Amino acid sequence: ISSHVAILVILLSCISMCSLGKFTSPLPNDIVSLDLATRLRNDPHSINIASNDYGNLVHESPSAVLYPSSIDDIVNLIKFSNNCSTPFGISARGRGHSVRGQAMARSGVVVDMPSLSQNGIGVRVSWDPSLGYYADVGGEQMWIDVLRAGLEHGLAPVSWTDYLYLSVGGTLSNAGISGQSFLHGPQISNVLELDVITGKGDLVTCSQQMNSELFFAVLGGLGQFGIITRARIVLDKAPTRAKWVRLLYSDFSIFTRDQEHLISSTVDNPSPDYVEGSLITHQSPPNNWRSSFYTPSDRSKIASLLKSKKGLLYSIELVKYYDDQTADYIDQELEVLLKDLNFIPGFVFKKDVALIDFLGRVGRSAASDENNHLEAHPWLNLFVPKSRILDFNAGVFVDIIGRHNSTSGPILFYPLNRKKWDERMSAVTPDEDVFYTLGLLQSSGAEEPGEYDKLNNEIIEFCEKDGIKIKQYLPHYKSEEDWMEHYGPKWNTFLERKNKFDPRMILSPGQRIFTSAI
Ligand code: FAD
């Protein structure tokens, strides 16, 4: 009798300590016996947050959310799932800025990564004779945190995303691209070492030299092989200011030729530090949430030009960084950069801003917070091989987007150098030296998100029919065949690595690669 009473007391104390209400299948009841049970919650608020993301298109409820107080909590949760006869899915949720439910785990457990910041490593800046300057960063940290911590030492990462309120683990699971990527590669090309909890629950340190297969698998690995708890990021001396220029074009060929010229630096052709092209249409006004750049008089000048050019213009945004040492030469350097370009005369607009204002141009409130989260974001991000961009322009920008007068939000289109990407990593790109990235960053607003989906599908179908071998960035597919097609020759390696590091297919089910969890 006394042993029964003891068991009852333990069970009751577990239930009262932990924040879990009634369980939902398939979480086994003995999960309450874990130390971490008090940090598992299934109250409506926790479930609601973990069932939503920036896309506001997919809504899938986990059985519980783990608010880890340490890395061990995540290790123990993953080990526990592995030991279940039917394991449950586990997704790390960085900032939930996915647009298609990629950080969700239907009926499984979502791990709220920001909770780690309470007892985590934060951002630690160091120097090593062989590595140079670097920062050890918790996987839950945001890029804005890395920027702020680096600047305290006069240092900064070299490769960025446009928007800095994304988690380091979340962007390294994709690639992390912006206008610096042509020069320094995506963010995944600027990582020296990682700590990763694999799908088996092993905490492993990996780099190009140590446990390299895991290192390459995880970078661009869509969360399939492990949860990144620390990333060692390359830092360099931070410039203090940026000369920021926008140039307008009406001819697509000249617009792309100039962008390709800018990203092909040689001794005679010094490169800018940042290049991003975009479209200006009646629906995507020149000033948008990405930054307010133009004055009201610039805007009316651009509006009349837009009218005379059938509602379609192209814009190159370029930046040259400088500091006190280079301040005397920066204008001259900028003139050298601009002199070979063929933008529309008179349509050059310049700004001179502090580095932090340039890197922080996509404001937090404007891009992400409450109001925006209420809207659906059926974004489409593609990589397009350079050899087909003229066809892409004719079929997509002029025809499809021209016909739909419902596009909203920025339309980015800028080139990247494939040699800056490491083929051994999981991320995939088109098979050409230069490829363009398209970011069709729509907000549904008053429109039905389905309308944008139709537009996105039309673009993808056009590329398929026309034989344009695009790759999706931040991919979203529905069938295994599509994923196999996406990975192409890398598929077998991807599969082998999955079997090695997450054999029970536990991690990031919201990506829908190995499970139909959503
Ligand atoms: P989440 O949405 O939380 O997670 C994304 C995926 O990564 C999920 O599968 C999740 O399980 C996995 N994951 C999360 N954390 C970890 C971890 N620590 N270890 C392993 N896996 C993990 N992308 C760019 O490249 N460039 C941009 O300029 C850019 N700008 C953006 C601007 C906005 C406003 C938004 C909404 C998105 C933007 N993105 C950009 C896309 C963004 O990089 C991805 O959506 C990224 O996944 C967001 O990070 P997150 O922390 O919100 O990830």
Image (tube, rainbow, N blue to C red):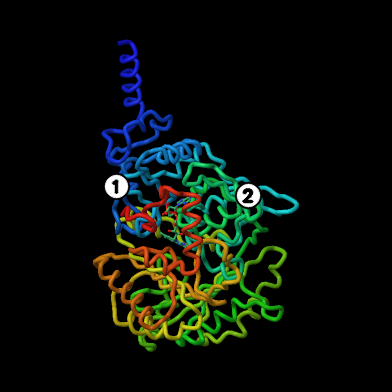
Q: Residues within 10 Å of mark 2 (few under 14, many from 20)?
A: few
Amino acid type, callout 2: Glu
Label 1: which secondary element: loop
Looking at the rendered image, the disc whose residue lies closer to the viewer, 1 or 2, is: 1
Q: Residue at x 46, y 49 (%)?
A: 502
* In-image side of 143 versus 128 (left or right): left
Residue 390 falls in image quadrant: bottom left
Q: How many numbered dots are placed on residues in this image?
A: 2
Front residue of 315/345: it is 315
Q: CA distance from mark 1 to mark 2?
A: 41 Å
Q: Which residue is mark 1?
A: 61
Q: Residue 152, labelled with which disc? A: 2
Ligand 1: quadrant of the figure: bottom left
Q: Residue at x 52, y 80 (%)?
A: 348
Image quarter where the C terminus lies is bottom left
* In-image side of 212 versus 291 (left or right): right
Amino acid type, callout 1: Ser
Label 2 C-beta lies within 8 Å of the nearest ligand 1 atom: no
